[in-house]
Amino acid sequence: MAEFDVIIIGGGPGGYVCAIRCAQLGLKVACVEGRDTLGGTCLNIGCIPSKALLNATHHLHEVHENFEKMGLMGAVPRVDWAKMQAYKDDVIAGNTKGIEFLFKKNKVTWLKGWASIPAPGQVKVGDDTHSAKNIVIATGSEPSTLPSVTVDEVTIVTSTGALALPKLPKSMVVIGAGVIGLEMGSVYARLGAQVTVVEYLDTITPGMDAEVAKTFQKILAKQGLKFVLGAAVQGAEAGKKGAKVTYKLRKDDSAHEVEADVVLVATGRKPYTAGLGLDALGVEMLPRGQIKTDGHFATNIKGLYAIGDAIIGPMLAHKAEDEGMAMAEILAGKHGHVNYGVIPGVVYTTPEVASVGATEEQLKDQGHAYKVGKFSFMGNGRAKAVFQAEGFVKILADKTTDRILGAHIIGPMAGDLIHEVCVAMEFGASAQDLALTCHAHPTYSEAVREAALACGDGAIHA
Ligand code: NAI
């Protein structure tokens, strides 16, 4: 008799959600986590702490940019970096303890330590070996830095070090204009640092709808971020004071360098599977280090499954969570399913940027006949009242059937607004379905409705 029905390795959003759902479905479940707290990268050194810093610095930015316009005069708050860090740490603690509470409530056993899999059906944690009918790997990912760059997490940092810098930098070079680079770059720009983002491609945020990416770059540039695009970073070196980044412009191969107090390397993440013993088990891997799984998260070893950042797909906490729930349902004999066509992506800058489904570029590449409904937040009274009217909503719909194929939003609360389109897409809705839905006034969501109207007979306030 196996000790557990399921042992999940990793207590991040993929693993802990899977564990809770397994328990809710009546399975005897354990989750192995080696960190002192549950929640994985997302809660400890990722999504959640970065949102705390983004929140604090957003308010500071508001004071600088908009308070006087609203008749709020007087002293600008002084930044107490240690206190801001303490606020961030409190937010982390509140969230991670919350997961611990949920484990207790749902009777999930937390096996504390780092796991390895000595044989199918066995998980070793410290000196103890546990048995399980099924094992789920949810070990997530780690920063993927450049070979020519040595990270010390003080002067040359990944996102982990960037969340806990010992002191505020006056200047920062960010390598990579992806989500991490722009979120953390925004934080330090708002705190007064001169931020230079060096990006290999000719646009920021690769994969994002090009029109949105262009507007996004313009807005961030207005906020003081400097962009060097089409630049391949060759190396970064820490010196006595700060660090130097060398890069070559791709258009003419010319060599350049830029110095700063701190360098953030944000060039992507890679699956984290070290120490599990997958090689010895003979687990099939993909060329980029992900564990190979079938449509039901099964590896080539019987009873061994994998979900989240450790397998193929977007490295997003909510994708991992969805896979965690689907995995639990499959293990409980139900029909777990993830709709990979409707996974939103959000960048939590100001303004926020959010997307779901196809970009215009993808539809063009596929030769799909589509129509575009666009609406600027300039026509949205609420956005204008809060000085956030710079962005727009863009809805892409099938030219013949009007079915929504994708949506891209840059503007206030974009990360929340996107979900009405997600729900619509889950239900196979047309743009007209959204357009015919009454939206409360005055809300930002009216801009979504107006974009949907623009797919048909036209928006009202454009
Ligand atoms: P990313 O893949 O989003 O962006 C990395 C960027 O670095 C790319 O634009 C790439 O072209 C550039 N780059 C790579 N090598 C370079 C070189 N030698 N010189 C110059 N530029 C170079 O990766 P990022 O931002 O590190 O994020 C990692 C993962 O974490 C992503 O999958 C992201 O989706 C996820 N994440 C999601 C967040 C969210 O949903 N809000 C927040 C933070 C991370």
Image: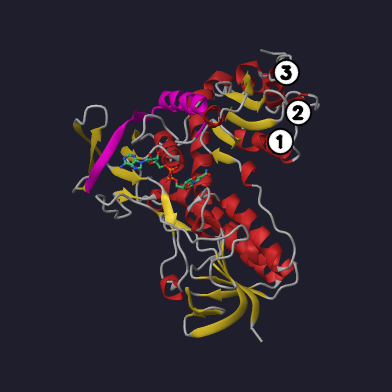
Residue 273 located left or right of residue 438: left
Q: Is residue 440 visible?
A: no
Rendering quarter of residue 321: bottom right
Instruction: Identify the amino acid type marked 3.
Output: Gly
- Depth check, mark 2 against mark 3: the one in front is 3
In which quadrant of this rendering is ligand 1 seen?
top left
The answer to the question of whether label 2 and label 1 lie on touching residues, with beta carbons closer than 8 A, is yes
Q: Residue at x 40, y 37 (%)?
A: 177
Q: Compute the Cα span from label 2 to label 3.
A: 11 Å
Is disc 3 surrounded by few (<14), some (14 to 19) or many (20+) residues within 10 Å? some
Q: Position of residue 412 (x, y in %)?
A: 60, 29
The circle drawn on residue 420 is: 1
Secondary structure of the residue carrying numbered label 3: loop
Q: Quadrant of the C terminus?
A: top right
Residue 270, position in %: x, y?
Answer: 42, 54
What crowding class fits label 1: few (fewer than 14 Cα within 10 Å), some (14-19), or many (20 or more)?
A: some
Q: Secondary structure at mark 1?
A: helix
Q: Earlier in the sequence, mark 3 or mark 1?
A: 1
Q: Which residues are magenta?
A: 208-237
- Tag 2–tag 3 contact (CB < 8 Å): no
Tell me which label, 2 or 1, sits earlier in the chain.
1
Instruction: Check the image and report above or below for 451 versus 146.
Output: above
Residue placed under numbered mark 3 in the picture: 456
Task: State the CA–CA distance, disc 2 to disc 1.
Answer: 9 Å
Q: Is residue 126 visible to the viewer in this orientation of the structure?
A: yes
Assess whether mark 1 and mark 3 are in contact (beta carbons under 8 angstroms). no
Q: Which residue is mark 2?
A: 434
